[in-house]
Structures are given as C-alpha cells and as structure tokens.
C-alpha cells in the first residue's frame, strides 16, 4: 500500500486564493519525497491537507489508507509534523516535551521513555535532553523538534521547510540528520523545500510545484538528465529568439534549449561545451557565456520561466 495517495486534491481559501489546483501524486512506503517550489507555491497548504489541519476543497488524499477528510483522526494518527515554526515548549526539558507528545499519541510511558533515550542518542541529544529546551542552541532545538515528531513512530513524517532560517553550519548538520532518517525504511518522509540542493540530496523523488500545480515529478536524476550532462548559458544582447534559431540551425541547440529574458540556456547532448562555445563565438553571439552541469533550478526555469532563487 502507498503511504500517501493524493487525487485531484485542491484548496481554494475563503476569499478565492487557489493555493492548490488539482494535484495528483503517490508516495510509496519508505520513500523520501520532496515538494519543491518557491514561497507561495502551495507546499504548506498541501502538507496542511495531508495532516488534516486544512480542509481540502476538491479531490481527496489518503494517508496509510485513511482518507484525510472522511477519517481524519485515523489519518492524523499515522503522521507527525516538524513545522517551520517551533512547537516545543521552551520552559520544559526536552524529555518532558517528548513525553507530552508521546502521551498525546497514545504511546505507553515506559515505551516513550525508551524511545526518548534511543532518539536522543541517534540525534546527538543525550547530554541535552534533560535541560530546559529554551537553553538549547537553535540547531539543538531543531533536532529536538525532530525527536519529538519521531517519538510517536509515525508511518509518515512531514518536514515543512526543515532548514529555513538556519545558519549554514546548523543547516549542514541538520541535513545529515535528515539524510540518516532514510535508513528508517519503515518510515515515509515528505519534505517541502525551496532549496534545490536539499531536494537533490535527500529525496528519492521530487514533485516540482509552481503556483499550486505539479509541473514535474520524477527522481532528481531523471529530471536533471532531461537537460543533458552539461549546458551552456549565455546572455544575448538584442534578438534572443533569433540567436536561439541560429544555434538550432548550427545543431548546437536542440528543441529543449530555452530563453528567459535575455538568458539563453542550451542543454548539450551531442556537443562538447568547447565546441558549443566556439560555435556561439562564430555566430557573433558572445556575451557572458558559461558551461556547467544542470541543476534542478534549470529544470524549474525551463518549466516555469522563473528561477527558484528569484521566486523564493
Ligand atoms: P508555500 O508553502 O509553498 O510557501 P502556501 O501553501 O503557504 O505556499 O501558500 C500558497 C498560497 O495560498 C499563497 O498564495 C498564500 O498566500 C495563500 N494562502 C496560504 N494560507 C492562506 C490562508 N489561510 N488564507 C488565504 N490564503 C492563504
């Protein structure tokens, strides 16, 4: 059985904002699945519907077989969420925070105690778990948030923008922790992010979401392979469409080359970057040229005409 099944799911907020527009996807048990898109794309709304805090206005979703609208309590019990905003009580110890969450989720106290010790060890919190949460550093508190979510042994763990607002060192540390969750094969993880590196590094498959719609869904490797092994990017002064046509005539650019504003992106399939750059010079198109490996940002740019970095 799939851990998550989403069918024509939609949400229009009162006032008319269509945040999610008929999306479909399935996540297999044990998979790490990413929703990648800029702010406002509809990621949190999707997570809200899957965790039963937001009521869908169209379609349906099932979590471990339970319909989120028809069986919300059962569906809710299957998952835990690490929210963008911290939920742990800073005046209580880490242990007490975990204990409260475990009790709410119906975990036996003794079992909760054992899991707390195990999670504290796994997440590097053993020395810290008996201190008031307010005395922990930002990164330590994030790890405690994850421990709290895991103490109920969710079938599905939702991580909503898990590393947003963290300094680079803490972010790197947290990414290690999240990557290690992949080893818990019995657990499914759905994470939302607007960071490409995060999606590429952590996710088995990624749905690219733009203005409430899924515009691409595949493994990062397949999404990237669509753009060849290498691409050339150039800025064109003047006629971009004409420049693209000339590059196509020369056989340098294929059907998948695209222009956004004055920026031309040319995925290379059979041509080396050296040959491509030489041809670009020959055609008198020399602006700023660079050759590099494609990223998910290029995939996003090609599909939406927008950059994730700019849109975020
Ligand atoms: P993301 O998580 O990708 O940043 P959100 O799901 O938070 O996107 O938001 C999607 C869209 O829905 C945005 O246009 C946002 O302004 C709008 N939105 C989110 N929450 C509400 C709400 N409670 N009421 C009205 N509009 C909302």
Image: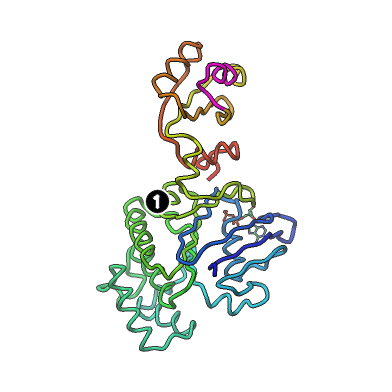
The residue that appears at 40% across and 77% down in the rendered structure is 151
Q: Residue furthest right?
A: 15
Would residue 33 be visible to someone looking at this image? yes
Query: Does the magenta portion include 251?
Result: yes
Q: Nearer the viewer, residue 127 or 172?
A: 172
Tell me if residue 132 comes above or below residue 22 in the rendering.
Answer: below
Of the pair 268 and 43, the residue shown nearer to us? 268
Q: Is residue 172 left or right of residue 280?
A: left
Q: Would residue 163 be counted in the magenta stretch?
A: no
| Res. 17 image quadrant | bottom right
Q: Position of residue 149 (x, y in %)?
A: 44, 72
Quarter of the image for residue 281 reads top left
How crowded pointer 1 is (Cα within 10 Å; few <14, some 14-19, many 20+) is rated as few
Q: Which residues are magenta?
A: 244-254
> Percent from the top left, x then y, of residue 36?
52, 51
Which residue is the site of mark 1? 201
């Amino acid at each position: 059985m799939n851990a998550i099944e989403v069918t024509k799911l939609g949400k229009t907020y009162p006032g008319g904002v269509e945040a999610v527009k008929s999306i479909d996807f399935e996540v297999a048990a044990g998979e790490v699945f990413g929703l990648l898109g800029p702010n406002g794309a509809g990621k949190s709304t999707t997570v809200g519907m899957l965790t039963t805090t937001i009521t869908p206005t169209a379609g349906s979703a099932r979590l471990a077989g339970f319909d989120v609208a028809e069986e919300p309590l059962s569906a809710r019990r299957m998952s835990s969420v690490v929210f963008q905003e911290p939920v742990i009580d800073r005046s209580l110890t880490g242990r007490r925070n975990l204990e409260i969450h475990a009790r709410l989720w119906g975990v036996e106290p003794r079992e909760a105690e054992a899991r707390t010790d195990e999670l504290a060890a796994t997440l590097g919190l053993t020395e810290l778990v008996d201190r008031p949460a307010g005395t922990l550093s930002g990164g330590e508190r994030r790890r405690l948030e994850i421990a709290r979510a895991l103490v109920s042994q969710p079938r599905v763990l939702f991580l909503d923008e898990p590393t947003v607002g963290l300094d680079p060192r803490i972010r790197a540390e947290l990414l290690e922790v999240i990557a290690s969750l992949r080893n818990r094969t019995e657990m499914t993880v759905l994470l939302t992010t607007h960071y490409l590196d995060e999606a590429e590094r952590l996710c088995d498959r990624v749905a690219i979401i733009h203005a409430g719609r899924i515009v691409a869904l595949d493994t990062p490797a397949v999404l990237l392979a669509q753009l060849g092994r290498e691409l050339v990017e150039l800025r064109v002064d003047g006629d971009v469409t004409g420049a693209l046509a000339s590059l196509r005539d020369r056989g340098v650019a294929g059907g998948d080359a695209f222009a956004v504003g004055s920026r031309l992106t040319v995925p290379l399939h059979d041509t080396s970057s050296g040959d491509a750059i030489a041809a670009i010079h020959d055609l008198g198109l020399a602006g700023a040229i660079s050759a590099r490996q494609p990223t998910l940002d290029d995939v996003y740019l090609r599909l939406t005409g927008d950059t994730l970095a700019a849109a975020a």
